[in-house]
Image (cartoon, rainbow, N blue to C red):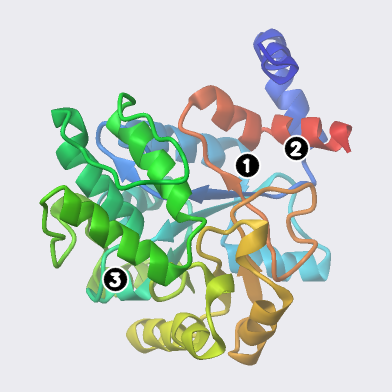
Amino acid sequence: MTLNHFIYKVARPFGGLQVARFLARNHPRILMYHRISPDGAPGTISVDQFRNHMNLIKKQFNPLPLSELVALHEQGTVPKNAVVITFDDGYRDFADFAFPIMKDEGVTATLFLTTGFVNGDLWLWPDQLKYLVNRKAHTGNFQLPSLDTHIDLNLSPYEIWSRLADYCMQMSNERKLTFIKKLYSINNIDIPVTPPEKYRPVTWQQVRKMVDDGLEVGCHSYSHPILTSMKEEELKVELLDSKKMIEKNIYKKVNFFCYPNGQESDTSAAIEALLSKYGYEYGVVAFSGINPLGDIWRIKRYAAPEQLMNFEKVLFGLRYIFNSVKK
């Protein structure tokens, strides 16, 4: 048991969460979600869990849109215990499950759209991997080409997929797509032209309706590539053309860009300069930090954990307090 976990277990029954909430009151929590499902399948948060998250945020915190948070930060008037909800990619389950729950609870969100996905031009490469692994891994006949790393095929399909996805993250976009095609080929499965039901995106019509109901929308690129491996003409498609596509469909200006994958290595000063050139005002990453709004091109977020215990650590500020002490 880690010290972090021990303190949580001991302190929680005696009001430790409220003490943490007070100590972390000036630290905005920007939460990052991806997928919601009825049953909480691996890699998702269940509908019931998500409703509990939103109910807790509504009762004990100050939920607000990302655009309002950054505006208040610039004015020096961020409210105590501010919380922002963000979702990445633009899966159909956001419209089917997440947004209705947030409407019921009176909580707003920012949705970062991968525009080629929403437009029906492509489906996301991690899902192409997941679809193949789920089709083949449980049969005992899943084949891998020669790799420069070991992946244990006795693991669960989800764990196999996770390791393959991590492996692909190290590749250039062209090499990654070639690798995925090879995987399908050696396993004698055709890549579906459009994403299967489980992996489908929201539609532009759904996005427009949610925007009318208060949803905020940002850009998450066109094809979810590794931006730092691309040339400037390719980046124009991912950064500028995708921005224009969203603005054309929702009739509003897009100010936020969320970096695909979102780690330190997934952006650079050159990419941030292009974002500014193309009319963006802010960039959003997928890792946390003590000062989430300290760099407008790298606004930091916490991944929303699936387990309630870990979610409470993030939401009430225990994670922030422990990280501050380490510093």
Q: Amino acid at mark 3?
A: Val
Please tell me which of labels 1 and 3 falls first in the chain.
1
Residue 214 visible in this rendered orientation of the protein: no
Q: Residues within 10 Å of mark 2 (few under 14, many from 20)?
A: many
Q: Quadrant of residue 24?
A: top right
Q: Secondary structure at mark 1?
A: loop
Q: Earlier in the sequence, mark 2 or mark 1?
A: 1
| Distance CA(mark 3)–CA(mark 2) | 34 Å
Gap in Å between the C-alphas at discs 2 and 1? 16 Å
Checking the image for residue 142, the label placed there is none
The quadrant in which residue 12 appears is top right
The residue that mark 3 highlights is 118
Please name the residue that numbered disc 2 is placed on. 320
Q: Nearer the viewer, mark 1 or mark 3?
A: 3
The Cα–Cα distance between marks 1 and 3, rounded to whole angstroms, is 32 Å
Between circles 2 and 1, the one closer to the viewer is 2
Q: Position of residue 280 (x, y in %)?
A: 60, 82
Residue placed under numbered mark 1 in the picture = 61
Q: Tell me the element at label 3.
A: helix
Q: Amino acid at mark 1?
A: Phe
Residue at the spot 39% in from the left edge and 45% down from the top edge: 164
Side of 85 where 323 appears, left or right: right
| Crowd around label 1: few <14 · some 14–19 · many ≥20 (10 Å) | many
